[in-house]
Image (cartoon, grey):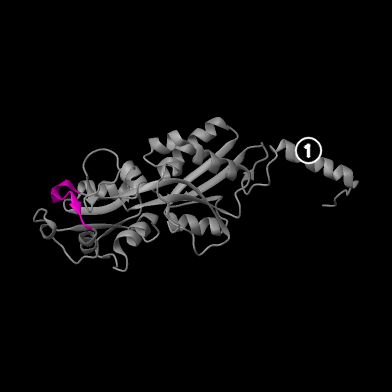
Amino acid sequence: MKRWPGPPVLSVALCLIGLALAGCSSPSSTTTTASGSSTLTVAGSTAMLPLVLEASGEYQRMHPTVKISVSGGGSAAGIAQVAARAIDIGDSDILAVAHPELVDSRVAVVGFAVIANPSVHVKSLSRAQLREVFSGKITNWRAVGGADQKIVVVNRARSSGTRAVFAKVIMGTTPLYEGGLVEDSTGTAVSVVRSTPGAVSYVALSGINGPGVTIVAVDGVAPSKATIVTGRYPIWSYEHMYTYGPPKGEAARFIAFVRGATDLVKKNKFITISEMHVTENDR
């Protein structure tokens, strides 16, 4: 379509007016419809899902013209999708080290727990014992002081950030046993452990709701806010919201809202970054 060039001063004036009407923000990757509403797509970590879902609902109530679509799929999927510009924000429990084009916004801290079916009668394991359990080296709970019962390892999918954090912090160079069950989401992993005698897995603390599972201490230290913020409990990570390039427009505003929603962060069993007494550069 042919453009009318117009005088330079008028062009600048129109541009300034447009920015003012847009709330003085830079262009966003979000979609604005003909009705003036904005849509935002967010996907990735299932550990983050409860927090992001509740935050999106609250944000949309405050901003009725904004529509936010939130889904899981795992941290790796969130990173891959935002890197491909298929979504606006990729949620992740892990760093996107292979994607320098992505910009990281840390919004909270999440703790992870080893959970077992109560039938195993084990309340604490050392890191060495955890490696033996999750590598398949031992196959009966009796070997670590528990019941005479077969160990049923419930791993997370390879796209899971929870799996990546557990493997890094606990397993090190020891590979995870691949002969057990595999569950994609936090909620499903919790349900399977709850209903399967001898089962054990690792999940976000934020996803453990109700009774029916035993939270296993690591080297005698149980996961809690107090033990995580001081670094005594080892399995935790930052929660990341990635954007392709610096966050702009509605994406930037929503990320800032999540980071600042301390009541929602705490309600969903996450920890605010400001509460941490320790810092890490590789989580």
- Residue placed under numbered mark 1 in the picture: 17
- The answer to whether residue 48 is visible is no
Magenta stretch bounds? 117-126
Image quadrant occupied by the C terminus? bottom left
Q: Residue placed farthest to the left in the image?
A: 148
- Residue at 65%, 42% in the rendered image: 32
Find residue 85 and report its image quarter. Answer: bottom right
- Residue at 36%, 40% in the rendered image: 269
Magenta span includes 119: yes
188 over 131 or under it: above or below: above
- Mark 1 crowdedness (10 Å alpha carbons): few <14, some 14-19, many ≥20: few
Where residue 117 appears, x then y in whole percent? 19, 48
Q: Residue placed farthest to the right in the image?
A: 7
Where residue 74 appears, x then y in whole percent? 41, 54
Question: The disc labelled 1 sits on which kind of residue?
Answer: Ile
Left or right: residue 246 versus residue 133 is: right
Where residue 98 appears, x then y in whole percent? 50, 65
